[in-house]
């Protein structure tokens, strides 16, 4: 892939700017109650978490997901509008994003919009995570059309403040034009064995850290500091690191908490929510 040479100048996050969590999508709240409860804990530096019922919103509102969504929404309200002046620093204020699977550009526009409307109507989500988003230049016009429509839907709803948030789940560095199509891009998703030797696309230096997210699985506890240093150096403001991996029958290593969750929360510390 082109543009993967690390820039010669110091990366803009090398000075230790605040990191925060983006959660790609936990298991159903019945299967992962501790994970969902932890997202609403005061002090968790959460930028956003993804709600995914059945590769989308499902066929009808799920009462357990409604409860989890309500808790996270209330936590954000307390963080942003609480009586204490530093609530926005201390408390969880993460958005809940609806999961839309683009299937690398194969899903019809009408299906995606129908799923988006269900997420907004049922769960009052504050944005969308566009999973399996195309990364090539040829897919950009369709993605721009979709994100423009999604922003309009969010603006019309009363659940998304500031117009909502759209995250493109490429998992790799896409064609640079995608940076203008959404609020944030996931430019790495994969194992620690690849991440520790990864390089950043030069064009990303034109954007601030809040525009990029990295998801890394199989990160040993002893390498947490190194992983966070790489994220800062490469200009990612949102991360999710876990020691879980995709071996031993674990189909999604991001579906549960890392065993060192409390430690990584304390290392990052409370942050201003997005």
Image (spheres, rainbow, N blue to C red):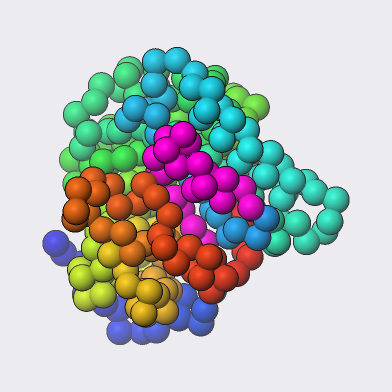
Q: 96 and 250: which one is in front?
A: 250
What residue occupies the far left of the structure in this picture? 1
What residue occupies the far right of the structure in this picture? 83
Q: Quadrant of residue 155?
A: top right
The residue positioned 30% from the left and 22% from the top of the image is 109
The residue positioned 70% from the left and 61% from the top of the image is 90
Res 154 seen here: no
Q: Which residues are magenta?
A: 19-41
**What is the x, y in percent for residue 245?**
26, 58
Horizontal relation, residue 73 to residue 170: left or right: right
The correct choice, above or below, for 47 with respect to 158 in the image is below
The total number of labels drawn is: 0
Q: 143 and 229: which one is in front?
A: 229
Horizontal relation, residue 138 to residue 203: left or right: left
The correct choice, above or below, for 150 with respect to 110 in the image is below
The residue positioned 52% from the left and 61% from the top of the image is 20
In the rendered image, which quarter contains the N terminus?
Answer: bottom left
The residue positioned 35% from the left and 78% from the top of the image is 223
Res 143 seen here: yes
**What is the x, y in percent for residue 19?**
51, 67
Q: Is residue 72 magenta?
A: no
Q: Is residue 25 magenta?
A: yes
**What is the x, y in percent for residue 235?**
41, 69
**What is the x, y in percent for residue 221?**
38, 74
The correct choice, above or below, for 100 with respect to 77 in the image is above
The correct choice, above or below, for 19 with respect to 66 in the image is below
């Amino acid at each position: 892939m082109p543009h993967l040479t690390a820039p010669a100048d110091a990366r803009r996050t090398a000075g230790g700017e605040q990191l925060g969590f983006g959660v790609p999508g936990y298991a159903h709240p019945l299967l992962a109650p501790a994970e969902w409860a932890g997202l609403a804990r005061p002090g968790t530096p959460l930028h956003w978490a993804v709600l995914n019922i059945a590769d989308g919103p499902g066929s009808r509102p799920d009462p357990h997901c409604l409860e989890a969504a309500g808790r996270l929404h209330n936590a954000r309200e307390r963080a942003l509008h609480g009586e204490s002046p530093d609530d926005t620093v201390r408390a969880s204020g993460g958005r809940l994003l609806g999961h839309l699977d683009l299937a690398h550009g194969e899903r019809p526009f009408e299906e995606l919009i129908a799923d988006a409307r269900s997420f907004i109507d049922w769960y009052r989500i504050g944005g969308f995570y566009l999973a399996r988003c195309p990364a090539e230049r040829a897919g950009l016009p369709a993605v721009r059309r979709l994100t423009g429509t999604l922003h309009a839907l969010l603006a019309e709803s009363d659940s998304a403040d500031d117009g909502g948030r759209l995250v493109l789940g490429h998992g790799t560095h896409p064609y640079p034009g995608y940076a203008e199509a959404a609020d944030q891009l996931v430019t790495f998703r994969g194992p620690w064995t690849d991440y520790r030797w990864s390089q950043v696309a030069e064009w990303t230096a034109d954007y601030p850290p809040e525009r990029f997210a990295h998801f890394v699985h199989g990160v040993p506890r002893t390498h947490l500091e190194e992983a966070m240093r790489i994220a800062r150096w490469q200009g990612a403001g949102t991360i999710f690191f876990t020691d879980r991996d995709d071996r031993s029958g674990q189909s999604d290593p991001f579906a549960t908490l890392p065993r060192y969750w409390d430690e990584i929360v304390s290392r990052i510390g409370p942050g201003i929510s997005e």
